[in-house]
Image (spheres, rainbow, N blue to C red):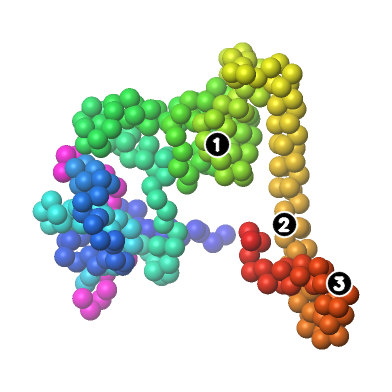
Amino acid sequence: MTGISLGFALDPLSVPLDKILPSRKLPEGLDISRKFKQIRSSIAEIGLIEPLSVTPAIKKSGQHMLLDGHIRLIALRDIGFAEAPCLVATDDEGYTYNNRINRLSTIQEHYMIRRAIERGVSPERLAKVLSVDVSSITKKMKLLDGICAEATELLKDRQFSPEISRVIRKMNPTRQIECVELMVSANNLSVSYAEAMLVATPAELLVDGKKPQKLTGVTQEQMAKMEREMANLQGQYKMVEQTYGQDVLNLVLARGYLAKLLENKHVARYLKQRQPEVLVEFETIVQTVSLEK
């Protein structure tokens, strides 16, 4: 069995800042933005928590191309650092890494705060550095308490309010996964949506076995209807999940068939004269380049 190669070396490498080349141009005015000031203040107070990501050194110049951490690099230079810990990419296709970079997710932020506190930085000091309330740091530090691993995996690349964790942890692991799947598939990671699902959750699927207080203005009949619709929606989600692969294949085959069909001038002319609405639909399907459109 072939081993799985890692995308980055396990141990950070200390690299002089003058040997790190940015891979993209940052927007003007970045150095006066609130985000930059937070990052600069954080590094100045507690040091660099998250290493930069770079390519292996270029043989001729000995310089590294920066893959991730452009704002941190500018902040380090602004403060006066001479070098920084870096994770060196081992993947030959490292230049594509930027295509996979997203904004810092809520769970990544949680891990960074946990690491800082484990290193002896107090929540009060972190709150001061990040210009937030101490309660915000506490919530982010305890973000995953009571959240099962499967639900955490579904949320790992997302941004959401820590208040969602407060709601989700009231459910048992099975229900947590169901609700997070629905939230992600609906692209709705709002607290109100999470609370609505909590209210619609049967008592046996809650950690304490007690139904939460009903939502203001919602009757018992409406609550019962909400529970039925939520169960029905979950069933539909599972059904779509099971047939998605075959549906995609059928759509690809249908698109190819329609493309060939419309290449026939006689067929295209007939449809234009007799069934123009059908022709418009066929052309829309053929011109579709993504199933998300």
Q: Contact (CB < 8 A) between labels 1 and 2?
A: no
Q: Which residue is mark 3?
A: 275
- The image quadrant of residue 44 is top left
* Disc nearer the start of the sequence (3/2): 2
Q: Secondary structure at mark 3?
A: loop
* Disc nearer the start of the sequence (1/2): 1
Residue 33: assigned label: none
Q: Is residue 181 left or right of residue 245?
A: left
Q: Which residue is mark 1?
A: 151
List x then y, in percent, for residue 159.
45, 42
| Residue 94 visible at all | yes
Count of marks, rendered view? 3
List x then y, in percent, for residue 246.
76, 58
Stretch of the chain drawn in magenta: 44-61
**Which residue corresponds to the image point at 81% horizontal and 68% vertical from the top-left?**
277
The quadrant the C terminus occupies is: bottom right
Q: Which residue is mark 2?
A: 245
* Disc nearer the start of the sequence (1/3): 1
Q: Secondary structure at mark 2?
A: helix
Most distant residue in the bottom direction: 265
List x then y, in percent, for residue 109.
36, 40
User: Which dot, 3 or 2, sits closer to the camera?
Assistant: 3
Q: Inspect the magenta stretch and tell me whether residue 59 lies in it.
A: yes
What is the spatial separation of the Cα atoms under label 1 and label 2, in whole angstroms? 23 Å
Residue 127 sits above or below residue 57 on the image: above
Most distant residue in the left direction: 80
Q: What kind of residue is marked 3?
A: Gln
Residue 81 sits above or below residue 131 on the image: below
Q: What kind of residue is marked 1?
A: Ala
- The image quadrant of residue 193 is top right
Q: What kind of residue is marked 2?
A: Gly
**Which residue corresponds to the image point at 21% horizontal and 51% vertical from the top-left?**
32
